[in-house]
Amino acid sequence: MIAIVKWVESVFASIPLPLLEVWGRFGYILGLFLTAFAYGRFTFRSQGKWSLTRNPQVWDAKALLSVPITFILILITGYIGSFFVLVPGAQTFESLKDLSVFICILIFGYPALLAVPFAYGVSDLIEGVPPEFLLDWGLAYFINPSCFWISYELIGKNPDFRRLRTWGGYAIFVIVFMTLEPILWGYVCSPQFTSEISYRNITPALFFTTAVTWGFAPFAMLAVFPVAKKYWFGSESEANSKEVPSSLEGFPIRIFIAAPFIILILLMVGATAFVTLRSSENAAEELAGRLHQKASENIGLLLDEYLEKNPNDERGRIDNIHKLLQKTVISSAGRSFLLNEEGVLVASSKEEKKSGDPSLKGEESEDAVVKAASTYLSSNGYNLKNLNASFLFDFDLVTAKPLSRERWLAHASPYKDPNGKVGWILVTVIPSSFYLSGIREGNSQSAMVFAAALVLSLLIAALIAGIVTKPVQKIAEASSAIAVGDLSQRTPKTKLQELNSLSTSFNHMAEQLQESFRRIQEREDQFRDLVDTTPGIVWEADANSFGFTFVSRQAVDMFGYSMEEWSQPGFWERHIHPEDKDSALRTYTESMRTSDSYDFEYRFLKKNGDFLWIRDIVKVISEKGKPKWLRGVMIDITERKGVEEKLLDRNRFIESILDIVPGLLYIFNIDKQEVAYVNYGTERLLGYPLEKIRSFGQNMVATLMDPEDFERYKNEIFPKYLQASDRDLIENQFRMMHADGDWRWLESRESIFRRDSNGNPSEIFGITYDITKSKRAEETILDLNANLERRIEERTEELKKSNQDLVEAVLNLERIMKELRETQNQLLLSEKLAALGQLAAGMTHELNTPLGAIASSNRAIMDILTNEMRRIPGFLSGLTQEEGEVFRILMEESLNGVSEDEILPSRAFKKELAAKLKDNDIENYENVANIILDSGLYKIGDKSIELLKSENSYEILKAVASFASLLRFSQIILIATGKASYVVDALKNYLHSNDNVSDEVLVPVDVCTEIDTILTLYHGKIKYGVEVVKKYAEGSRCMGDTDRLNQVWINLINNGLQAMNYKGKLEIETKKKDGWVIASVTDSGSGIPSEIQERIFDPFFTTKKHGEGIGLGLDICKKIVERMGGKIEFETAPGRTKFSVWLKEADSV
């Protein structure tokens, strides 16, 4: 073992001393940090996780009792260990005490940490450590257990020795401890024992003994921990990792009871020991001074006697004086020696090898005591030559082996022999242990008494605290149990009067509280029953965070989320539909600002991914003027929203159908004198948007209708409603102001839509058409007829006069030639009158044909609207979703069929279709076949048959046919109106062909688009037997007047169709050439005969039958094209005629 210690010392000796000093200082600083960390209850690992927190400490009976147990274990192991020497002259079996500290800190934790410094100090006192050392090492006594605290952090209070992790933590602790603690004590001991001894001797010895400690520690842990867990601290160790309830935080009452008692004992015993020690030391030092003085006087007398007998034997005298000093009493415990006035050692009670050497000074003596005393005298400025009086001084003597730091008391006095030949300084030195040994032994015994008293006081304090706090603890435990719902708790009686009164009051309070809770529980059950039977989610949330604090169990059934998920932060906001989130958050924010209750609707995500529509009715609860809680009810309105959506879709569908109906549909409220409903026909007929119409309110009719017509409406039309039945039609023609400022002629047909409770009409349903063009055509025809009659009368009178002149010419031969000329002129005039009559007849036929088509189509539309429109809205609203989809598909296909080119199916096709319908069990199959053919639904093939297998298929088909007929008749009216306008405009252009020529403004015109528009107007005529071939050049834009060019296209297309009797091929082509746009219309008719080719552009020349044309078309076309800077030419051959119009290209202008 000594060899191992020497090897360790050699290792430390090889390390430079400055490096060891830096290492020691660093260890000391780190130890201070660990001390603050440990005694501040800081930890880097809490509840099994790495984090910097503070460990709470529960000061229960076990914690308080662990303090005296720690004292006892450290004192006993320290006392036993002092009898075993591990390092001779340096270290006893200190490892046993360190092992106790290690075990106590691991088992008891923080209470043991508090007790260790004091227990360690008392143990050292018992072992004989000087009290002054304890004061010097006071801070180190706190640093030392703090190093052991690392084991508590790494291993824990309840280590599992079966896991490698536990032993890994132990290994890390040992490494850290061995690196830190021995070198730290080297730094602490350096002021008392010098750096050389501290780092070269003390640190290696501690390193060795500490290593022995950690060799024994695993066996001690394996032996002690099972016993501790089984008999006392098992439950405490298991609960160590758990969070301490807030009710147990702070200082318990037992600490305030025990702490003053313990502190008082410490102060009293400590103060008594300190005063006793100091008085004893002072008395011992005084006695030691007297002993020095007596010893010096005795030695002086012996020297006087010896020198008188041997005055001349110098060498023999020195040896004899040495022997003389050895025989003195003081030399047996200390030293006595003589110095001459130069500090040379004359003689010493301890034998010196160089004794008697005249050059050997006291500071150079081999004896450490002589050397230290001589050094003190010389270094403190004492002049030995002039020393006339004796004095006392002391010094410390430090030795490495054995390790010691001893205080020596010395006495120096001048000596001269009786003959006056010798002048020496007599120095006597005794160690403090010589005169303080009894005191130190008493100190050790006092320390034992002090330790026994302290341990006893701790036990008594713990016992008293337990007696006093046990009833209080029972009340606290009962209160905690009541707090968690156990209202049956009662506390037992106690012998302590005040605490017994408290217990009685507590039991009475618990009984009242139990009764109150019973009543509250009944109310809670009643409230919960009400909440659980409410058809919605009752909830409460924090107003600031909207975190749910309560939701009824319907929340789980309705949305699928657990109660824990509802209580998560931000749950409500995360599950709102993205499209509703902004509006919902705005509503929430606004209610927080105003503290008003609110009611809103939004979609909320279910756990399965679906969304539910909910209505949220919320009340804001405020405290001190600020919103505190939100309480509300969520109601599932998904089914209602679905019904609303279906109704909205159906209404939008019906409105879209009504919006495409030509004309203006409206419902007028008679009582309020305002429009209740109107379609978008207002924009088409009058140019006003719906918002503008509604803004007129009650003044709409009076504002927009012509005043004369308005008076007639009030006096003649309105009274008819009071007498009319529900099926009566009331027709009216009137003028209304268009948005562009012009008057429009309108024709309306109205019937009663709704009556009030008295049977009086309250709302009128009507449809209105624009008949402005018809009215203007009618006025033009009337004016034209009036002019023709007037001119015919004038010409008749002229003919009568001419006849008279002819009679006179016969009688007067001289006037024959003159009369012949006049007759010739009259014949020419007659020819023109005949042509004019032919023109009037042709105009009449041309206008009567479109006007007849308009009247016939209008009557058909009114019949449909009157008979079908009343039935269709109610019928459509009663359809199922599948039947509504069938209606939508058939309606779309029918409307497309009306507007597309088609060839009328053959009779065989009709029979085949009827047979298929019959085979598929379609009722009224012949009527259904006729409707399918008329509506154009035969184009979708067998798909129409599949769609007609529903229960209401025949009624659906009739409704579709009605709307398709409306569109077809509207197109007929549009084409007929265009044709009538064309005839009137053609005559007007011919009669005023030279008017306003200079006023025309030419603009870019898309030729292809305009021609397509014209073809649409002729769709009804060309769809049965005409093949239209279009060859358009890209970007065919010319400079011209759109309306006049449309007259050209209409005339050329109409001539082509008539030339081939609406059977054959019509080719329309546009191309660009050298800055011109050339538009050509080619028909497959018989061609133009060569004999009339030069006359086709003459006015009133036509080859058509009477009533089919007036012979102005090509003449007007030529003049229109030429006025735009273009030209018109034709090519003809049997079976093919081509008219080409050359117009300037828009991009080249």
Image (cartoon, rainbow, N blue to C red):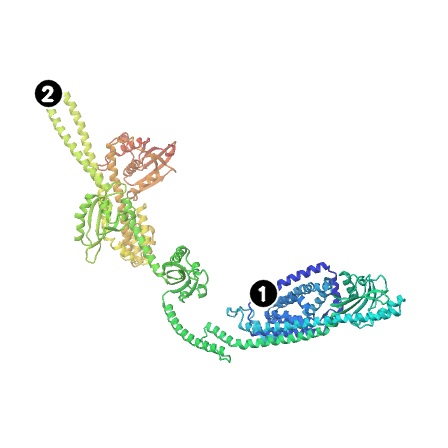
Residue at the outermost top position: 814
Pick the front one: 695 or 507: 507
Residue at the outermost left position: 811
Asked if 19 appears above or below 1139 in the picture, the reply is: below
Pick the front one: 286 or 123: 286
For marks 2 and 1 on the same chain, the one whose residue lies earlier in the sequence: 1
Q: Position of residue 168 (x, y in %)?
A: 63, 66
Q: CA distance from mark 2 to mark 1?
A: 158 Å
Asked if 501 appears above or below 140 in the picture, the reply is: below
Looking at the picture, which amino acid does disc 1 mark?
Gly
Q: Is residue 810 left or right of residue 455?
A: left
Asked if 212 appears above or below 1107 in the picture, the reply is: below
Q: Is residue 381 left or right of residue 270?
A: right
Residue at the outermost right position: 312
Residue 907 makes an appearance in the image? no
Q: Position of residue 662 (x, y in %)?
A: 27, 47
Q: Which residue is mark 2?
A: 812
Asked if 835 appears above or below 885 in the picture, the reply is: above
- Which numbered circle lies on residue 100? none
Residue 351 image-quadrant placement: bottom right
Residue 24 makes an appearance in the image? yes
Q: Position of residue 792 (x, y in %)?
A: 16, 32
Q: Quadrant of the N terminus?
A: bottom right
Pick the front one: 822 or 205: 205
Q: Is residue 373 left or right of residue 731?
A: right
Secondary structure beneath disc 1? loop
Secondary structure beneath disc 2? loop
Q: Is residue 709 left or right of residue 441?
A: left
